[in-house]
Every structure is written in structure tokens, then in C-alpha cells.
Amino acid sequence: ERLKAGKAIPDTPPPTSPAGQHRLWPEIDTLVKQQVSMARLGVGECGAGWQLFAEDGEMRMYRREEEVDGMVVDPLKAVHTVKGITGHELCHYFFKPEYRYDWETTLENMQVLETISDDTLLFFQTHKRIWPASQRDTLFWSHMRRLPNDQDRDGPDIWAVVNNSTDLASYPPNTGKCVRIFLTVCLLCQTRIDPPKDGAPISRDNITCKITYCSVVNPGGWAPASVLRAVYKREYPKFLKRFTAFVTNKTKDKPIMF
Ligand code: 18C
């Protein structure tokens, strides 16, 4: 720090995230920005071909049928609105490893391979096997970020978590019993507050969270398209309902985390 007119001023502005020095940082920062701006677009705004494939209450799930080398890699975009929880809470429970077994139904085993920083982790997971296909595993970095709310400067910040596959020499893909899945996932959460008219303190009844969940999953090895589409048609709605119910339940008697 230097002294200017008697005041201490830092030599460099603080980094956006403490993960700034890590080898993966340039990729993480670029991809997070890209994923967040894509997730912020409505299905009508991000290209043609989105079809609604699941609907339940406020939840809507859209997919675009896509194949790469005969493998189904359909991008998914889901939107949901949930009362009583904030975007920070949703991202917190999605990101933190200690809660993952409580809501992630596809999980067999999870390991944190590296703590890059408080908001950036490297995960290795094995998933439940779907007979008769081979078992799958995933190796991905996960980054949680607070974003300024530029539409409403007084409103709560927007929160996001981005998960993206990466590789690590000590965990090469497709060497054991598992086939490696490649994924890019973005969870983006925007909180709205409708303050009580009488000036009473804000309670969980006054908050609503708009959730956008986008994913592209490459199954890594061939699997019949019809089976794959049937699996994600069942598993994605199950995930989003179970995960949001978990957060609602976990936070109901806790102070609101804005
Ligand atoms: O985003 C989610 N979870 C995060 C934290 O775990 C993270 C991980 C995502 C992994 C997604 C891939 C998991 C698929 C595993 C195989 C399927 C097991 C089914 C178990 C049935 C009991 O980002 C939430 C993820 C929600 C996942 C929905 C399922 C997506 C299915 C995609 C198909 C994958 C191909 C599997 C090959 C099987 C072929 C018939």
C-alpha cells in the first residue's frame, strides 16, 4: 500500500475472486461471464428450436434436440419461480459439498479434489449406474459468484454457480469402470422483494426467487438416444423440484441470507 495525502490506497484493485492466481482462472472467468449472459436470455431470445418438455406449477423445462457424433447432447434450459428463498441461499446449497448428498439423487460418490478458493472448487463425482449402460463419472470445477443487479440497483444481487468439466492428469477419463461425462451447467438466481406495505420487516413471505438452470451434458460414450432422452426427462424435473424443496426446508427457520 502507498500513502497518498495521508490516506492508504491499495496498489492494485482487489481481484474479482480470490481464485485469480490459479491456472484455471482465465477459463473460469471467461466461461462464467459467457454462461451468465446466456442464462439471462429468455428462451425466446436465445435462438430457435427450444421445445417445452416438462412443466409443473411454475417450473418449465425446454430442450433443443442436438447430437454430436450420434450422441445426444440436447441443451436444456429450465426456469422456475420459488417463494420464500433467496438466490444467495439457492447458490450456497448448490455449491457447498456438505449438502450435495442431501439433494443430488444421481450421486454415488463425491470428492473435492482441490479447494481453489472459497468460491471455487474442483469436484470428482461418480454417478449411479443406469442399467445396461456403463457407470458415469464427472470431473469439474465449480464457481459461485455474486453479480451486481444492474436492472434494479436497490434490489438484491444476482447469484450464479457455474460447473464445467475439466481434466486432471491424476484422474484420466475412461480408464476404470466409468465413462467420463462432460458437462457445462449454470444456475442463475434473481431474488425479488415485495416489501410489506406497513413497513414491517421483510419476511420470507415477501421474497421470490427466479431460477434459471441451463445445462449441456455429453454422455461421453454412446447411449441409445431414446433411453438418454427418457432419463433426462425424468431426472431434470426431479432434480429441480427436490433441490428447491431442500433449500426451502433447510432455510425456513433461519435468518434470510440476502
Ligand atoms: O447440476 C446438477 N448437479 C451438479 C452437482 O452434482 C453437477 C453435476 C451434474 C452431473 C450431471 C450428470 C449426471 C448423470 C449421471 C447419470 C445418470 C444417473 C441417473 C440416476 C438415476 C437414479 O452440475 C444437477 C444434475 C441433474 C442431473 C439430471 C440428469 C441428467 C441426465 C443426463 C444423462 C447422462 C447420461 C448417462 C448415461 C446413461 C445412458 C442411458
Image (tube, rainbow, N blue to C red):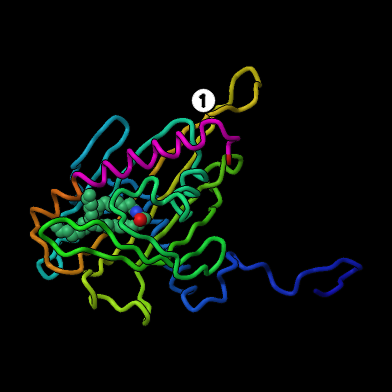
Residue reaching furthest top?
A: 198
* Location of residue 79 in the rendering, given as x and y in whole percent from the top left corner: 33, 42
Q: Is residue 195 magenta?
A: no
The answer to whether residue 235 is magenta is yes
Looking at this view, is 95 or 190 the one in front?
Answer: 95
Q: Residue at x 19, y 44 (%)?
A: 234
Q: Nearer the viewer, residue 73 or 44?
A: 73
Give the percent coordinates (x, y) of residue 82: 41, 34
Most distant residue in the right direction:
6
Viewer-closest of 98 and 11? 98
Of the pair 206 and 154, the residue shown nearer to us: 206
- If the image is split into quadrants, where does the C terminus sit? top right
Magenta span covers which residues?
234-256
User: x, y percentage for residue 237?
Assistant: 26, 41
Q: Which residue is mark 1?
A: 205
- Check disc 1: other Cα within 10 Å, few if <14, some if 14-19, many if 20+: few
Looking at the rendered structure, the secondary structure element under dot 1 is helix
Looking at the magenta stretch, what is its main secondary structure?
helix
- Residue at point 27%, 76% (across, down): 173
Identity, as a three-letter code, of the amino acid under mark 1? Asp
Q: Residue at coordinates 15% horizontally, 68% vertically from top-left?
A: 68
Q: Residue at x 8, y 59 (%)?
A: 224
| Image vertical order of residue 51 relative to residue 224, above or below | above
Look at the picture and state if 131 lies above or below 197: below
- 188 is higher (above) or lower (below) than 219: above
Q: Is residue 11 left or right of residue 109?
A: right
Q: Quadrant of residue 155?
A: top right
Is label 1 within 8 A of ligand 1 (CB to nearest ligand atom)?
no
